[in-house]
Amino acid sequence: MSVSVIRRCEDHDGRVYEVDLVSKRCSCGGKSSSQCKHYRWVRDLTEGAKTVNFQVISALHKEIRRGDYARAALWLDWAVKIRGESRVKQYLKSILWEETRNFELHKRWASTRGRSAVDMLDDMVSSTKAFEIPANLGTQVLVNRATYDAVRMPVITPAELGPPGMDELAFYRWFLQYFRLRMAWKTIERLDRFGTLGRGKEEFADMWSTFVSNLIEALRKDGQPVAAEIFAKELPMKGRELLPYHAPQAAIEVLVGLWDSSGNEFKGHPGDLLEVDAVMLPEYALDAHTQAGAARMAKCDRLSPKAGAGLPGNLDLRWSGQLLGVWWRWNAVRTMGNPGYKTAEWTDPPMDPDEYEIAVDVDKFWRKRHPLTARWKPAAV
């Protein structure tokens, strides 16, 4: 973008307005600068205001999920201006296993030195997304079920960490172990505000190491040495303080056959960029990870919309990282196909009431430790 006092800003309806940052005027007309949403937004972006920092990253992440390169590129430009290119590259690398199961991309990003943030964005947008892999459809239902059951079970013990085997419930069993470990770690983090649980952390680290070793060994026995080598580096705790989140699920999916080579594919994308300097923050960028989105989620929690009903207000979770949004995408691809899901509204995909209820329940729990209320029959463990 060229440096100018005039910024072209696209509104939600597609109309473009010119914002003059010096005279504090906007071509939408008739409003003072303090009342004009276009001026305030462009000003905050230009000044790198603290309030827009995470909103910009949230919008960038959502456009990556949507596969909209033009809009993602615009948000990337602002993110680099506000955060710096190094931090943005680090962020893109951190969401690799969250958004994809692309081993070719992992290899390409083994070192990002010399790769620009623009190059990395091109890679990420064009990669097949995890929820688009045919072998992966339905996975999120099992994830939600295992999460739900794990929350209701006692704290896991070392004696329960044997390899689960490779039957039809293999993914569920592996993920149940993983999430029970995650719940144990969350308990330790919550109780250890003053750093007094050194022994507890050591015991947990030993259990996590056992889980990782079992998983890596299972990958090797299954004839997947490349995946075993990759995840042997990805899964260990970082300094016994940070627990990987998405990589364990990716490893389990590969082990039990919920991955295929389409996950390594890159698809072309439109090369044209938007001919504006900024766009208003889209509604789907506001979820529980942002202050405004959290307020909307609170209203949604109070109203408790049923399966097939629209979400209240302007809440749009289709591209959210919340568990409810993640489940919606998997369900939309499963029921409407690819690329049909990309233009679907919230109420378009058929929703199984039981699946929806458990997704809502687990999402509430994960966000604010809300008591589980869904009547879900645990699978046989």
Image (cartoon, rainbow, N blue to C red):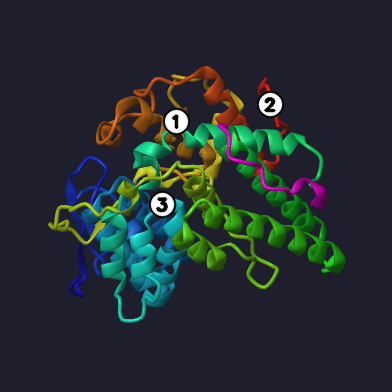
**Tags 3 and 2 touching, CB below 8 Å:** no
Measuring from the top left, give residue 355's x and y in whole percent.
53, 24
Q: Is residue 253 above or below residue 223?
A: above
Q: Which residues are magenta?
A: 157-168
Q: Check the image and report above or below for 173 versus 57.
A: above
Q: Nearer the viewer, residue 104 or 365?
A: 104
The answer, for residue 98, to whether it is visible in the render is yes
Looking at the image, which residue is at 35% across and 56% down? 60
Residue placed under numbered mark 3 in the picture = 99
Q: Residue at x 37, y 53 (%)?
A: 59
How far apart, in angstroms, are the residues tagged by discs 2 and 1? 34 Å
- Label 2 with label 1: CB-CB less than 8 Å: no
Three-letter code for the amino acid on which mark 2 is drawn: Pro
Q: Is residue 188 left or right of residue 265?
A: right
Image location of residue 291, percent across then percent down: 53, 49
Task: Choose the circle earlier in sequence order: 3 or 2.
Answer: 3
Q: Which secondary structure is most common in the magenta stretch?
A: loop
Disc 1 to disc 3, C-alpha distance: 27 Å
The residue at which mark 1 appears reads as 313
Residue picked out by circle 2: 378
